[in-house]
Image (cartoon, grey):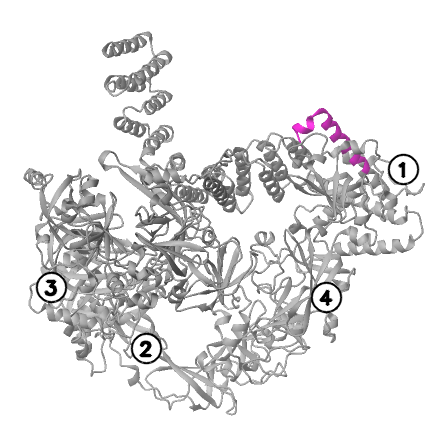
Amino acid sequence: IMTIINADTSFPRGRRSREKKEDESSSTKKRKQQQLEKQDDKDFLFGEQKIAKPKKKMKKIGFPEDHYTDVSINVHHNFPLGGGYVKLGDRKKGKETLIEAISFNKLAKGTKLLGIVREVNDDFCLISLPNLLTGYVLPKKIESIPLSQQLLVGQILAVHILKTSSDTAGKGKKQVTRRRIEVSVDPSDINASGELSRHEVLRGSITSIEDHGLIVNLGDGRKGFCNFSKVEGMYEVHCDDFHKKIYDDKRFLNEGRIYDFLMEDSADSNPSSIISLCLPSRKTLSEHVTPSTYHPTMQELLPGSLVNVKVDAVAKNGLLVSFAMFRGAITTSHFGANWIPSNKSGNIEQWKPIFDEAAHTLRARIITVDARTKVIRLSLQPHLLNLSQPMELPKPGTVIDNATVIRLDFSVGALLSLPPLGVPLPYLKAVQPNLAKNESYVEASRRPVAYVHISKTSSSRTDEDSFNKDFAPSTKHKLRILSTTNWVDGTATAATAMETMEAHVLQHQDLVPGKIYCNVPVCKRMDGGSVMVDFGLGVRGIISVLHLFDKSNISSDYRMRLRKEKYALERKVDVRVLTVDPANKRCFVTAKQSLVKANDTFTDYSNIEVGQRGTGFVSKIDEKSLYVTFFNKIYGRVTARSLAAELGVEDHQSDYSLGDIVKCRVISCRKRVEKNLDTYIDMDAQDVEYDMKKLGFWDLNLSLQVDRAGYHDEEVAIEKAKKMSKKIKLHSGAILPLKSMKIVELAPSIDKKRGAGFLPGHAIVRIKSKYIASAVDADTLPYVECKVPFDQVIDSYINENIETKEDMDDFGKKHFTIGKKINYKGIVLRDPQKCSYEYASAVGKLPIISLRPRLIETSEKQKENNEKKESILIPSGDTDLYMGALIQGYVHEVNPKHGSFIHFLDGVTGLIPKQRNGLLLSKWDTVTCKIEALDVTCKPPKMLIRKVSAEKLVLMPKNKDKKIAILPGDKFGKVKVLDVNFNRVKIGTLGSNIVTDYEVRARLHITMAEISTMEKVRSKPLPEEERGIEHISKGHPFYNWKTGKTLDNLVCVGSSVSQGILFVELSNRDEGDETFFFQTASELKPGTRVSCVIVGFVKSGGGILVQPSPGLTCFVPALELSEDPEVLNNLQHYFQAGDRMICTVLDKKAWEKKKNWGIKVSLPRTNEDNMSRVNDNPILSWLVALSDENSSSVIPKHTKGKVIVGRIKNSMRLYRPPSLMFELRGGYRGRCCITEIDEPDEWVNMPFGRQKKSTGDGDKPEGEEPSTYDSILETNKMERSSGYRDGEYIQCHVIEELASDPVVEVSLRKSRLQGNLEEDEAPEKNEVVNAYVINTTKKGCFLRLSRCVEGRVILKELADGFLPDPVVSFPMGRLVIGRVKAVKNRKLIGKNNILYNVDVDMRESQLLEEGKQLQFGDIKVDCKYKGVVTRIEDYGAFVTVVKSNISGLVHKSECSESNTKSVRELYDPGDLVKVIVIGKDDCNQKISFSMKANYFIGDESSDESCSKDSDTDSDVEMEEVENIQKAELQERVDSDDDNYISKSTCKVQRKKTSDKNDVGDDTDSCSDTDSDEEIKQNVRKISSNKNNRSNQKAMDTDVGFNWGATPVKHNKESDEDSESGSDIDSLDDEEEPGKISHSSRKKAAARRLEEQQISKREKAMADGTADENPETPADFERLLSSDPNNSEKWIRYMAYYLSLADIDGCRRVAKQAFDRIDFHQEGEKLNVWTALLTTELKYGVDFDETITEACKQNNSKQVYLRACELLEKEISCSENKKYAVERADKLYMKMCKKFRGKKSTWVAYLSYLLKQNRHQEAHSLLKKALLSLPSYKHTETMSKLAQLEFEFGSIERGRTIFDGILAKYPKRLDVLFVFVDKEIKTGEIAAARSQLQKSAEFRKKKLSDKQMKKLFRKWMKLEEEHGSEEQQEAVKDAARAYVERRS
């Protein structure tokens, strides 16, 4: 296939030379032939291919000239009889007409054939073609859809030949000619390009699947649509398993799928029209006959079309037919029937009577169309007419004895008839009703045929004459079927050669796994010891070393001799097939006699049954299992535990070897859904459907004990249990008798996944079910496997000295032996609650058994004392526990943070806190404890316990036997107060008549005390000394209570026992009080009214904490307390701890669902350290505080027009930002649009500061892109103070409620609060409006004019000048002013609000120059204007005329007098230029400008042409435009200034006033004076900003390079000179004499300073020093304009901005450098990227992202190498060395992982580690490097490591590495010379000399003369530099001796 893919494609070029005119006496036939050839040339794309002249073809074939079909004869519309390639006969000479076969040589590009898809793969497809040909299809593009998703096996469709090629392979007798036919199934190659007709068949490819149908590509730009209702039959959309799909009545619809569609309506040639299609079923398509009204051309005729043909004539080997305007032929091979000739002449006359009538009409299908040669071939094959598979042929490999020759193709092959089928084809009558009536035709249609090529008749070359004689018609032969893939012809291919007849198999597909093949010859012995055998016909199998003999682990000389003798070449052996891989043509067989002769083996999982025996061999051994392999990739597993339990095998790894023959018994064989999950499938279930694609994983469990009696019943019981889902209940605490546990496996200890320590190992034991399960469950399973952890063997491990997991494993091996029984009792600790099938399949966790003697003894006593009142318990989940009970367990873990965790039965756990000496216990010890605290509300119960020593164990009576005489409702008389505090009062004696066994302690909690309820909020705030303090004030229930006070009429409301003490809760409330005593929060149902006492305040002001009962804390949100913002903002001023209020319980779930929708952070903690989070408490509402509230638990939604109080929440997710979010009553959220913060006339700039946008909330404007502020403000919600404090309560007005989610639209406008709810009106066109910025992108800016009106500003209308970064200039929330251009309705939102979209222009020129802009008609040719460069392209620059919207192009040829290659070198966006109009196109509104200097010679700066034709003021100075840009720059800098919008508004108002006052005045008005004054002020602002920037502290600009120049220091002398200046008359002519003010002196100083700076710069530019030390961005831009590819200048430019502490400016310069540096200059770009990486490393936060971006534009490996180098340098100067090292390590590891095959990355990492003195890590890294790198890079890597060892590591280790390299590669002189240089560098001259001398002596036989010459030169150079004359002579002597030996 790769040869086919890589075949070259040759396209003809040029035209054929014109032929000379023939003489007038030439025959008419030759002239017609010449005209036809010229016509044929027009049909070809390139016109180079020629049709051979008839004479040449006649001579080649051997037929007379007049018998050849003359394609020029004008018969039947220029079509010859029978079409092309038909030789007409001559009745006079007795020669019949002959139809030539369409062979490979007759095919050409453009021929269309009918094919059937035979094989489909992702990258190629094989298609069966007529005349036993095969074509292939390749994907059109590499990234196209795989062919397996386009075509289906068995699909019948027309194909288009792209090219044919042939080549030869092999030499001599083995030389083979390979012929290839590449075809296409693409719609553009199949469908006609002209007009389409209704019901025409069209080839289509599905491009997309929509909701209602399919979009289909029809080629040549045509598209069609097929509704799902038009898809006939069943179909499946988006199927995944494409390889297994076969073409049938079901349709698989996915993108790329190719089908033949039917067009429903006619369509023209317009490609844009959508054609209505239907996808017919196979039956509909097979019955579709081409309508008689359809008249296609020859090129439009499609193979596969069903037509009605008329027989014109009968040929020797077929029929000549006609249909419509065409003529064609049908050969006898496509009659659909095969007749046997009566004699050897081969003349078959039986079929002629059937077709002898000329008017006979048949139904045929077109199979070949060649417009070039006028060839049309048709077929009468029934399976092609029915569009189905051909008749069933004998399988490949079948031998047929009596096959009769029915046709002989001389010297080519023969067609033989096979025994007929039993019944005729079922669909014959449907497709050929007339022929089906003929018995002769029906009988012949049942006879299959096979074709035998001449090369398949003998193993040697066959003589043609003998072949023609032997295979004469009607002769019989014995043959063997080779293939049945010629589906179009319905013919098999066969062979009669003796070699083929005797071959074991024909191909790898014929090999059957598990089948025995005898007497197979050995053909090759391989190097590794394997043997190859030959099955015949090139099919070979491999016998691996393990399968040569039964015992494969024996290695001796005798075995070697036996192998040579038994497996000698051509020696025949008996083998059995193990596995076969037909796709890769591989086969593995075994010669083990035990396997070959075995009768019990497995070849299919589905046929394996439980208890079945089978013989296999050991293929894998690991710690847990022994893997056995059978035939056909059947694998089974024998677990180590089963080997130990059944055979007593202690170490299976030493007892068994690979290749051992074993006989196994099947324990279970089940299928899994997934490979690594315990998800088994019940294959016997009838009502369950499984996805068969996932049923590919089998689990075969085996046993090696096959002869024990009773095993079959046990296996049946296990299999029965696997099908049951009943839970098996084990007896937790059950005692196991002695020797009831058999050890089957030992599992080692493992490290914990988290934290330090290890998990102890365990022993797997097998226990009979009767000991461990209930009586009902014991019969379910014969045995249960459990585990005994190594920490459950003894009671105390203190003396065992176990510190590591190895110690624990040694302890386990000492006590447990595999195969032995445990001679101890056991107790069941934990029941995993598994089903019977989980136990039987060893799925899930195992039950845990303990051998602890104390636990077993206690459990036995517990059962004996079950009827007694006292015992020590081992608690489980069902044990009735009580306070003070004694329990026994074991220490599972000692946690330093909490204490010791004690485990009991069934996962019950208790905690001994560290305060109770919990850290003093020893791990794994058995302990007895006492329960001190108990929580029985959860399962299992939670317990706080303490250890009880053995000598203090006192068995206490159970709690239920103690007497509790005090119950709720009991009343008490006089009692005495013992102590008083803020929360409770301790009560003394309750009375002598109380009898109880407990110590009694009584108390009166603050919530249970009598007090008057607070009915309303205090009208005045509390005194400062009482705010937020817990003290007993006048309103406190314990006010004036003192110790010793006597109380009367107390009632018990609750009692509880804790630590043996009876606590009694009392109350002195009235009996009519409607409050209750609540023990848990679950008793507080929504809507319940409770009386509560304030106990605390939430620090954030979110509410108060109250208690309705002792120990039960609830939360009351502040919004539920009052509607007064003053009270809510100062809760502690109006509420006091101890106040009582009546509250109602809210529905917490509904409240939090609405509240948490917009919360990003968790609620704050309360002011009490020991209190849980607020959101864990019940939510209450104060009933009395809000007059409209009742006892409902759900607060209704806020309605429109209501005035409410909201709480500002900056942590809430923004909804349609910019906006202010509120928390409202009932958990609702409020949103206040930025336009509703204040009245429009009082709007301020940036009212919220810089808000971070929320993604995904609300509606976004179209084209919105992420703002750069999202990355800048990662941690801050607000960058600047906004005036709206988080958590503040504000009164607002509801203006709208949204039904989609709990959001309420509110407003803070004063007019809204007064009742004005009308929406703001939409602005009018040309109205000047204020607006807030919503979002800014690179395309423009989006504004919000009001809550229901939004606008947009395109980029060019943001400002008059060029904006380098509009996102920074217009952040979200900025207040701007603009003029409305257009207003349009957009859509409806909410309920009744209409959202308008307006287009706004924010340019100042538009605001100030209303009605005075230049229009397109004002522009005149040859007039000069001033403009601004707005855009630069390769072909020129775009310039916008000042004070207009007119833009034109300056072509690059008009940019300069000289020829320039790049316009970007001359101009940048924003440059001020002067242009002249050289062309104007009024129709297309286009203008052409020129900026050549010769147009402006003699012009003054103030000159402006064509001023009389312009409505605008044309005397605009260039200085004014510059100052406007500078003013815009200042505005961008002050974009956050609150007075910005007021300044802009003043300009507009002043301009309007000026326009009114200047009517009829001269053009020089006061408005110009004001404008000039503003320009001067802007100049002063810019100068001031420059001075401020100069005074800023310069940043460290060391970014890894030598920057050259240092930043220029600010000149302080200029400031001093400016203060002393007094000449101000020339500065300001508007100042009157005698009125020189302080401001005038400042103006003069600023002007003088500016002049001095300009003069200084001019001088520097004149003498060239400005280029050496650039000081301004203009200097850098000038330098870079002449040399934009110089990275050093770009880096100095970046350093300039770093010196000004402008990181963003540095980034902008780097980005500009990437755009302007030529893409060929990769090194220069990489230098700038390195500088940017250094900058981000030191000052930025995007270092990793910068690396990613750099990799996209540079060599990724070089980027990572430089980044790693930067991080390595950072280690030396970093304060946090550890963090720097970790960061560098991480990047080095990432680099090596990303470029694992690159040597330089590993060498860099090794160098880094050795420099850090981390030698051990470097050596470990070397191993990974050698595994990752290719072998040819190992030498260089080792050499680099040796060099690094010399420099940074051990010299001896470096020498060792060099010696190892030279020993393996003695010819590597480069390595030797590096070794010598390193020795010389370290001063070891003697060692270097020794290496050279040793190489000259011992490697002379391995080195060439040229290498020896280099060696002696290196040695001589060493001696000349470091040796003596005697040593130099020694070198010369050695060289002479070498030369003499060589000569």
Task: Quickly name the residue at label 4.
Answer: 1238
How many marks the image carries: the answer is 4
Q: Is residue 397 visible?
A: no
Q: Are marks 3 and 2 in contact (CB under 8 Å)?
A: no
Determine if the magenta segment contains residue 1654.
yes
Q: Give the residue at the far front of this rendering.
A: 92
Main secondary structure along the magenta-highlighted residues: helix
Q: Quadrant of the N terminus?
A: top left
Instruction: From the top left corner, tell me how far across and down residue 1701 is, in percent.
Output: 63, 42
Name the residue type under label 3: Lys
In the drawing, what numbered circle is on residue 883? 2
Q: CA distance from mark 2 to mark 4?
A: 65 Å
Q: Nearer the viewer, residue 1620 or 232?
A: 232
Q: Is residue 1378 visible?
A: yes
Mark 2 or 1, closer to the camera: 1
Q: Which residues are magenta?
A: 1647-1670
Tell me which residue sits at (55%, 80%) in the image: 1194
- Chain-order first, disc 2 or disc 1: 2
Disc 3 crowd, CA 10 A, few/some/many (<14, 14-19, 20+): some
Q: Nearer the viewer, residue 399 or 1170?
A: 399
Q: Quadrant of residue 1809?
A: top left
Instruction: From the top left corner, tell me how far across and down residue 1443 is, in percent.
Output: 79, 48
Q: CA distance from mark 4 to mark 3?
A: 88 Å
Instruction: From the top left corner, tell me how far across and down residue 480 is, in percent.
Output: 18, 52
Q: Say left or right for 1915 vs 1470.
A: left
Q: Nearer the viewer, residue 715 or 1812?
A: 715
Task: Quickly name the residue at label 1.
Answer: 1625
Task: Quickly name the residue at label 3.
Answer: 821
